[in-house]
Image (cartoon, helix red, strand yellow):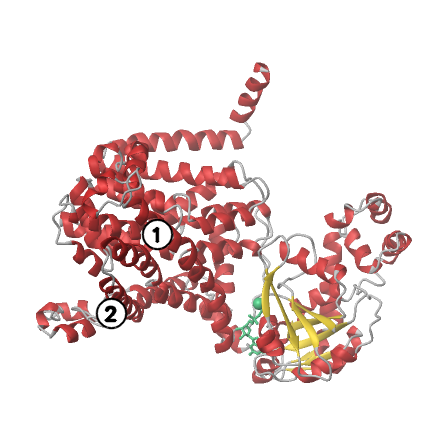
Amino acid sequence: MKTFALAGNPNCGKTTLFNALTGATAHVGNWPGVTVDKREGVYKGGNENVNIVDLPGIYSLSPYTPEEVISRNYILGEHPYGIINIVDATNLERNLYLTTQLLEIDVPVIVALNMMDEVEKSGDKIDAKSLENALGVPVVEISALKSKGIKQLMDRAVAMSAERKGTTVLKGVLDKQLETACAFYEAAGIKSSLFHAVKLLENDELELERKGAKQAFEEAVAGEDLEAVIADERYKYISSNLAFIKVKKAGKGVLTKSDRIDRVLTHRIWAIPIFIVILFCIFHITFSEDFLYIGAWAGIGGGLPALDDLELSEGLAAFVGIFYDGAVFSPGVILFNIFDTIFGLITDGIGGAIQTEWLSGLVADGILGGLFAVLGFLPQILLLFLFFSILEDTGYMARIAFVLDRIFRRFGLSGRAFMPMIMGFGCSVPAMINTRTLADEKERTATVRVIPFFSCGAKLPILVAIAGGIVTYFRVGNADLITYGMYILGVCSAIVCVLLMRNTTLKGETPPFIMELPAYHLPGFKNLMLHLWDKTKHFVKKAFTIIFASTVIIWLLSHLSWNWHYIPDEEMQNSILASIGMLVQPVFTPLGFGSQIGTFGWVFAVAALTGLIAKENVIATFGTLGACLISMGAAITGNADAILADEEGVTAAIAMIEATGISIPALIAFIAFNMTTIPCFAACATAKAELPEGKFKLTVLLWLLSSYIISAAVYTIGSWWWTLFIWLAVVAVVTTFIVLRNLGKFDILAIFKRKKKGEE
Ligand code: GDP
Ligand code: MG
């Protein structure tokens, strides 16, 4: 069977075309050694069946990003029958840049001019025949989204002859140098000599690793720096030789629809306020318990009645409670409530059906409780991802990255780092994978390291429960304000850490921001759903594996004594978990939730520890331990049933506050610790895969240190306000050191190294 590889820029419609071609035959694997998805499938719509491989989206075939290396190695090493180069016709110039590189390889290429529906809608025309003549390879107009032109594309692809010699647009410019370089590869018997030769002239590190290449390189380029020259020549060729292809109906100087939208959305002053409003709307729709502020508005005129005041029958109250309680809930909260009600019914049904006490506890609290605590948040996380996917697919995110570039640059990052960071609010795992769009390794390392500080969906329940606990128990503050403040604390920590790293261990230039701004388009439904699934499957998988296992283990450890006897809730103090907790408890003393909070203080230590497996565990642990504390009479808040009925974990948090007598600053420090410490197991594994060799251990150390320092600061300043001055003094000293060192006046590391040498 012939194999065709789909190659093209990110967002050119590769995945859409791939899905249209392969339908149900597709399966997803991984490229060896990296976590980039590899999609393969079979196209059965033509005279013969062919294999289709979806290569990662790339702008070029240089050796800078893993995607580029994967695509390049695949095409050169795996010898596909041909390449289908997908070109976004609404962004021809930028997309053809990659085409000019693909043409240099000795492999049949066919160009699929995608998004022709958009082009036609805007009234432009593209002269595909002329483009075909100019490039010397077949060009077919298609619309992947509307499944138009796909059969023609595949028919012509299959009909291509298997032999093709590479061609280059650099002819007549670097002939002499190319000839020398080509000779080297031909002598070595390497296929696609033209492609390799051009790369060699570009000072390409993969080529220079080849035996004898260094010498050939020196000989060919003779001390010149050709990389920029070559890039420049490609663009020049495209704009002077291929510009005629695109005929604008409306004539020059008239703005397209995208341009007009951009005049507002990327406005010099308004772009960022507009973006903040959009973000706020997304969070409001997903998380607000007072949708459109109906409750608050009604409050001016006396307010809406609370659910309890309506005096409905039990069943009706449960139903109405899904949508309303003194205010109308947002769609996200309504979805959450629906899930939660269903889960509650299942848990009650199963838990009640089992007669044995310990088994019923294990199944209802240990297994179902933990699983549902996590899955309950799925609707809101899905909704959040859906909005982000829409922003991404329409092309808006790319623009925001562009707008924010100005600001990010001050902190030593480019605007591209923005997308992964904002995704971090959903889940660190896809966010870290998304850092692949950052070409610079140091910038990428810094970004991966701070992603956990952008409080992910799984940390939200911790915030909600403890903020709710503080407000209800101590009768101070405002839960929303505490939650919001913690998000900001996370973002500030990220900024400080990036500044620190970019000025010390990860110093380097921030690469210039070149990014294609795709034309705006309405996202396709099927595509959106696929993106959504792509992003949530990690989460679902996590719920059924890591979290499932760890809740069972926590339950077992909290209900087993050291001699493996079952102990009921009331005697939890004698459990294995309690003794482990007591052992590590002193470590947290400087943070306020250690030895000073007495006999039951270990529950906070255990919650923090279980969070290392998955952040959802913190709240699942709260539920389990809070219920036990009430059963054993250490806390008097309601009864254990109240905890299971309280899906937000506030009751459990109150029980823990009551039993330990923990202070408000210590509670806030506890949240801060969980927000900035080592992320969950899955995120750690991703970080290890995404970070350059040897950087992972340091990263874990950074997470540990930062969370420890941040929450110690929160606790001490909250407890004794004057310690603020001590912390400020420390910050001042550290800053001075770094500034002096960067000015070359004072090298603390050099002194240290000299000393070490002297000792040896
Ligand atoms: P990839 O990054 O190359 O895999 O691109 P995707 O397949 O994810 O497509 C990016 C965006 O372009 C999605 O919103 C698609 O719906 C949209 N898209 C893809 N093909 C077409 C097309 O032929 N016409 C239009 N109007 N939109 C398209
Ligand atoms: Mg894709």
Quarter of the view holding residue 694: top right
The residue at the point 51 percent across, 45 percent down is: 446
Residue position marked by numbered label 2 in the rendering? 329
- Residue 344 locus on image (x, y percent): 25, 65
Q: Is residue 402 visible?
A: yes
From the viewer's side, name the closer residue of 592 and 253.
592
Q: Is residue 426 visible?
A: no
Residue flagged by tag 1: what amino acid is it?
A: Val
- Marker disc for residue 552: 1
Task: Give the Cα separation between the discs numbered 2 and 1.
Answer: 33 Å
From the viewer's side, name the closer residue of 403 and 292.
292
In this rendering, the label closer to the viewer, 2 or 1: 1
Q: What element carries label 2?
A: loop
- Residue 567 locus on image (x, y percent): 24, 45
From the viewer's side, name the closer residue of 363 and 2.
363
Q: Is 187 situated left or right of 362 in this image?
A: right
Q: Pick the quarter of the image with the N terminus.
A: bottom right
